[in-house]
Image: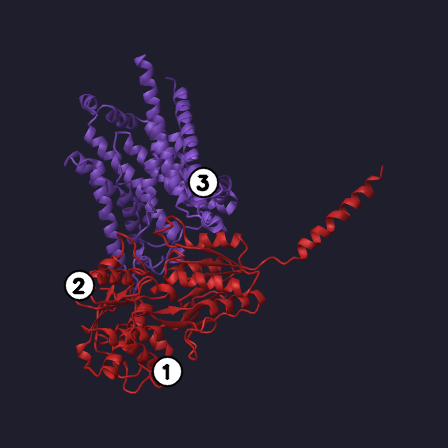
Chain colours: A purple, B red
Amino acid sequence: MLPAARLGLSLGRLAASLFLSLVFTTLILLIAGAPPIDTFIILFAGGLGSVAKLAQTMSVWIPLVLCSSALLLAFAPGLWNIGIEGQIILGAIFATGFLRPFAEGGSPLILVGALLAGMIGGSLWAYIAGVLKTWGRVHEIFGGLGLNFVALGLTLWLIFGPWRRPGVASMSGTEPLHPSLWLQEFKGLSLNPVSLALALVAIGLVIYLLRSTRWGLSLKAVGQNPDAALLFGLKPNKRILESMLACGALAGLAGALQVVGVYHRLLPAISSNYGYTALLVTMLASFRPQLIPPICFFFALLNVGSIQLPLQLKLDSSLSGVIQGVLVLSVFLVHGLEGRFRLGRKKE
Amino acid sequence: MLPRILRLSLVLLFILPFGCAKKAEEKPFTFGLLLVGPYNDRGWSQAHYDAGLYVERKLPGVKMIYLDKVNPADRPGLTLPQLVDDLASKGVRLIIANSDDMKDGVREAAKQHPEITFIHVSGDDVITGRAPANLGNIMGRMEYGKMMAGFVAALTTKTGKIGYLGPLINEETRRLAASAYLGASYAWQKIRKKPLKELKFKVSWIGFWFNIPGVTADPTQVANRFYDGGFDVVISGIDTTEAVVVATQKRKAGREVWAIPYDYKGACEGADEVCLGVPYFNWGPAYLAKVKAVKDGNWKQGWEWNGPDWNDINNEDTSAVGFFNGPAISNEVAEELAGFVTGLATGEINVFQGPIFYQDGSPFLLAGETATDEKIWYMSQLLQGMEGASSPK
């Protein structure tokens, strides 16, 4: 099939899934006794209604794009890197650790170091999952899940122990960073240009790497057929570790940006579950890089707009999570039905 | 056909009055409320939510916009300044933030929105000088409520073991746990005439104001451990109702145990067999004063620590803290409690009177010394005689 036709097919599936999830969500809203059309309008206006809202949506879009790009790299050689959640957390931990000596503030250049530290932290965590897979034969889903728990435990221990605020034992988080070490935001908006630029560079770079480099091609070859790749001298295990390292670096960057750009401290919920959300995004995009930015935007929109539900309709804002979940299920359903339909046709 | 200019002016004549009428009609005053927990948690957040409703009742035309579950675990990815932006775009002129956990976020948001007045409940930015000019603090003198809770617990316990289900450790929670202990030790020594060393008072901290699965210690488990360890009264210091829930389960299993919840006047409901009473916050009067002041343009920055109305600590319109006697309190204990409250009211009884020692043996109050507000607010340790961590280990 031509690339354009394949993209068209993906888009068609996406549209069908969107429609399906719209139907499901409307049903849920009707059962909950909420006016469906108003709810959708409020939800979307809540993420798009003004420049400030748009900025807020973009500030969620950034980590989602970084993590989804990261997952594309891992998926190329066929890895389900569910450990991305922990890799974000390790990025946040490393960045916070790097910044701890600068409690009195300092030059913004220090932030470069913090971001690099975050990338190293994420890579390290991903590398462990990679080694568990290639050397220990632990499937990356199980290894990753385990490492996620360890990462959360590590954060809790740091927040409650060595990095606690003086005189306080609270799970709420570490002492905020000195304001000179916060990424400067656009004036009056909760969005900072550095994070935005990094997210754009990341998705661009990933598309370039996967499409136009030998390395990207070899990753895909490993994903398609590890045995053949081995025969062709593509060293599958080495490729797997490399892709994990790259994926972890981007996830770690996302975590570091959450620290220096959003929360300005380390807290237990620092990953905001963006890793898991990014997994949904990439599945929804059928691993097509072009679809990542718009789907991330849609999810960010839901995330930010949902805050209006309790404010204006007294609805629980977890509805946005329901929509996201329903959407992903719809994608699988559409996919499955398509297969069934094709299979049926072949039989005839 | 009328000349165009005439038509236009006719139209204007029709439209203008409506336009003017709209303008003359005053925009309703709205205030925002940020709650750390669910608005119906039967604890800390619900007490605040009810106060917002109280203001709406007392000042017709004033509207509250609230957002609950404002904490990173429940609302991943959203920060307090962002939520304040949301409220600001709805035109609120006063924002009340109800959690210690929001301290840094409120300060940041207040700097970004000088046009809005902020009240941070339980904070002390005004004392420490870190507050921008549009940020004030209020708190209730819950120390009294906790003394009463401790008093009732010590008169009720049969095993002589009182558990205190603590949230996280900071100055506020230390002072409240210590107040409960001082009330208990007063009752134990002065009413029951027993030596203090026979009273066991243990504090277990969960790590946050309420349960966050996988992050904090589980308050249900902590309460269970207390009861299973022979503690027959548990005083809750957390935002939610786990202590009375677990106590009720133990009762159903035939154990003679009690609990004292916290924060919310209605926290005893459904726990008739075990609930000895609840020290609660009544934020209504303070909220009302703040809304009126901001509305009339005469709000002044301040740090307020509002006490009970000693004429009637349960007066909805005047008392900032109260104690509601629970269904499980015995008549004798209730009588003694009334005497204790009178003693506190007249100043005859002051449990914060030296000599009192910190947990490590260093003096908190010297002999004959009574504690100043500042000394109580900034307690740096638990007191001698209390078991449990004073500060993070």
Name the spot of residue B83 as percent of width and height, x first: 45, 53
Q: Nearer the viewer, residue A318 or B8?
A: A318
Q: Which mark is residue B228?
A: 2
**Secondary-structure class at tag 3:** helix
| Mark 1 Cα-neighbour bin, 10 Å: few <14, some 14–19, many ≥20 | some
The answer to whether the residues at label 1 and label 2 have Cβ atoms under 8 Å apart is no
* N-terminal label among 1 and 2: 2
| Mark 3 Cα-neighbour bin, 10 Å: few <14, some 14–19, many ≥20 | few
Name the spot of residue B360 as percent of width and height, x first: 21, 75
Q: Nearer the viewer, residue B61 or A55?
A: B61
Name the quadrant containing residue A292.
top left
The residue singled out by tag 1 in the image is B342
Name the spot of residue A194 as percent of width and height, x first: 41, 45
**Secondary-structure class at tag 2:** helix
Residue drawn at (47%, 69%), measured in percent from left and top?
B286
Name the subunit of mark 3: A
Name the spot of residue A88 as percent of width and height, x first: 30, 45
